[in-house]
Image (cartoon, rainbow, N blue to C red):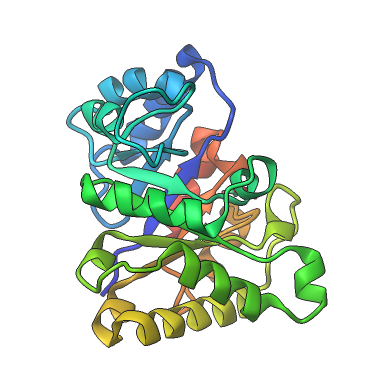
Amino acid sequence: MRKKIIAGNWKMNKTVAEAVTLVQGIQAELAGCLDVEAVVCPPFTALKSVSDALADSQIKLGCQNMSDQDNGAYTGEISHTMLRELFVKYVILGHSERRSYYGETDKIVNRKVKKALANTLRPIVCVGETLEQREAGRTEQVVEEQVRGSLADITAAQFEDVVVAYEPVWAIGTGKTATTEQAQEVHAFIRSIIRDMVGEKAAKGLRIQYGGSMKPSNAKELLSQPDIDGGLIGGAALEARSFIDIVKAGM
Ligand code: PGA
């Protein structure tokens, strides 16, 4: 049985004070939550304060990016050591915004995934097609390429610490959610690729999140699909009430 994982991707939002207020609001209802794994991914500047606020909580801390290098002359980058020091457990890698605005390729994402796994950080690896690609009937081809490229050389044992997020780019921040059928279909497809790459056991154990305008009103239906094991939430994670309600939809 795969435990559902709901992660809030706060993107470039929230000052330190706002971040602490938000996480306290989430804590008020979910601090002891064991049924669903709840993760918050604030911006780097708020990690320390949110980490302190989460001491003794079941809610886990994640971040939104990480360098593929260990340390040294990489201006503007953040290393796995710096993140581990703040008790970060999860790192979102290869989000479509990083792929499209900052030129992250599958190769770069793959280097980051390997670096994260080698340093006991759990990657949430994002894949998904654009509207143009979907309309051209290329969804499976694009998703397969991203999955195989971003997760190249990852062993079956390492897959225990990997989460994949299927986020159709046309559904991110647009209010347009994939239908449950569309989402389930791609999730099952992703699982079949993983089965082909590393075998049945790893494929069965892998948690695959859906992301793209998930909100309290559509979460339950999406999360009831057999291959949808959680959500990566943007807009609806910026308010405690809606994030809590999505986590509860996964219980
Ligand atoms: P959204 O973002 O929920 O605002 O669509 C999801 C994401 O980008 O992870």
Q: Furthest residue to the top?
A: 17
- Residue 107 vertical position relative to residue 224 in the rendered view, above or below: above
- Residue reaching furthest front? 73
- Residue at the image point whose x is 25% and y is 31% from the top: 81
Left or right, residue 120 beside residue 131: left
Where residue 134 appears, as percent x and y from the top left, is: 76, 73
Q: Is residue 147 above or below residue 117?
A: below
x 39%, y 28%: residue: 78
Q: Quadrant of the C terminus?
A: bottom left
Q: 101 or 128, which lies in front?
A: 101
Direction from residue 24 to residue 105 in the image, left or right? right
User: In which image quadrant can residue 101 be found?
Assistant: top right
**Residue at 57%, 54% in the rendered image:** 105
Viewer-proximal residue among 74 and 182? 74
Q: Is residue 114 above or below residue 46?
A: below
Out of 53 and 71, give the one closest to the viewer. 71
Q: Residue at x 53, y 16 (%)?
A: 15
Taking depth in this image into account, of 200 and 175 the one nearest to the observer is 200
Query: Along the horizontal axis of the image, is 153 left or right of 6?
Result: left
For residue 251, say whether it is visible: no
How many marks do you count on the picture?
0
The picture places residue 155, in percent across and down from the top left corner, at: 25, 70
Q: Height in image: 127 above or below 46?
A: below
Is residue 171 in view? Answer: yes
Residue 130 place in picture, x, y as percent: 73, 63
Q: Position of residue 240 (x, y in %)?
A: 49, 34
Residue 113 appears left or right of 173: left
Q: Quadrant of the N terminus?
A: bottom left
